[in-house]
Image: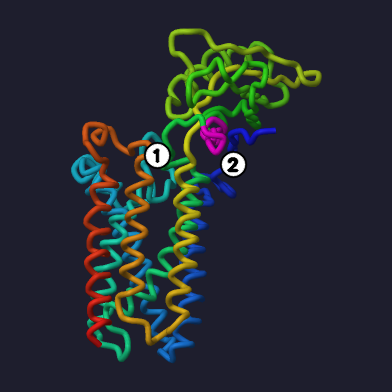
Amino acid sequence: MMISHLIWNGNPEILSIGSFSLRWYGLLFALGFLISQQLLFRIYRQEGKPEKDIETLTIYMVVATVLGARLGHVFFYQPEMLWQDPLGVLLPVEFTPKFRFTGLQGLASHGAAIGILFALWLYSRKKKPGQNYLQVLDRIVIMVALTGCLIRLGNFFNSEIIGKPTDSPLGVVFAGRITETFSRNSELVTSVSVRKNTKVQKAMQPDGITPIYVYVFFQPGTTRETADNFAANEAKFYLARMTDFVDEPVGLPLNYKIIEETPGQYVAQITTNAIVRHPAQLYESISCLVLFALLYWLWSRKKEKTQPGLIFAWFMVILWSLRFAYEFLKKNQVPFEDELPLNMGQILSIPLALAGVALLVWVYRKKSLD
């Protein structure tokens, strides 16, 4: 049997208490820093560097990453926030239509890169023995690659930074957004299940479109009339507007039927089409994991005797070249990018990759002269 696309119906939330929710993205983000800190302790011990400096370095990194990523997103993708919602730039909550903890929605890796480069420059000004700017960068980018792997995995759980439609068997239907939308907006819904509709031949569908069933399970005691009204109106309303994930025509009535699973327990079986997309987050996550292994291997060969700037240069060349390539498979994040020959992610990746090439040339030339 040939491999078919995956239906991903994972819940982005681990738990929810009132307006506060703990999400996989936040956990994986924090886990990246925690694991990186322990690995940095290992590197510093093997190189004979003072381990007490890692606590200070961690603070620099956390602040620089979060602040840089957030400001980068605002400046590069949503500059209108500076005058339309200035509090929303840095506050992890929203006040309208009601108060809700949201986290910082919108973080840009290019902004994080700029923030980290600046923060480590400030850190290195202390002129610590054996810790000049390039040497600090060499060690830190190993951890950045690992943290990037976990952050992109968090993006996958959030069904964000999605890829373009694809007919590839590696494609993913991000059904979690359907479940989250239905469950958040209606107290009638207890759970949502999304399954492939194998009764419709895929050959009849255009690329990136696949037939699915959406099963909406209602609270016990919900009447057939209430369930029917929800499916015909609310479910149709939500599905028709989830254009990144569902191909539900606006002008036609929803194709559904109400099933009485057990006496008094109703389920709506909705027939619609989903959009299969490249799991761009997983592509980047796996690439970052491989990059982490490569950079760690480069360091392990000579450790503190590694040519300063070598690891950082390879990181810049590989990471930002891959980012440039993967952007061809990703959906543009904001509408204005549709008018550009290259999207914002590619435009910002070019100078960073070229800086890595220049540094790599400088490192090897310096090494040949030593």
- The residue where tag 1 is placed is 329
Q: Specify whether 337 is left or right of 144.
A: left
For the record, the magenta segment spans: 168-180
The amino acid at mark 1 is Leu
Q: Badge 2 is on which residue?
A: 10
Residue 218: name its quadrant.
Answer: top right
Q: Is residue 328 above or below residue 75?
A: above
**Magenta includes 331?**
no
Percent of width and height locating residue 364: 27, 76
Q: Is residue 321 left or right of residue 170?
A: left
In the rendered view of the protein, which quadrant contains the C terminus? bottom left
Q: As drawn, which residue projects farthest toward the top?
A: 252
Q: Nearer the viewer, residue 281 or 33?
A: 281
Q: Residues within 10 Å of mark 2 (few under 14, many from 20)?
A: some
84 or 154: nearer the eye?
Answer: 154
Q: What amino acid type is highlighted by mark number 2? A: Gly
Give the mark nearer the N terminus: 2 vs 1. 2
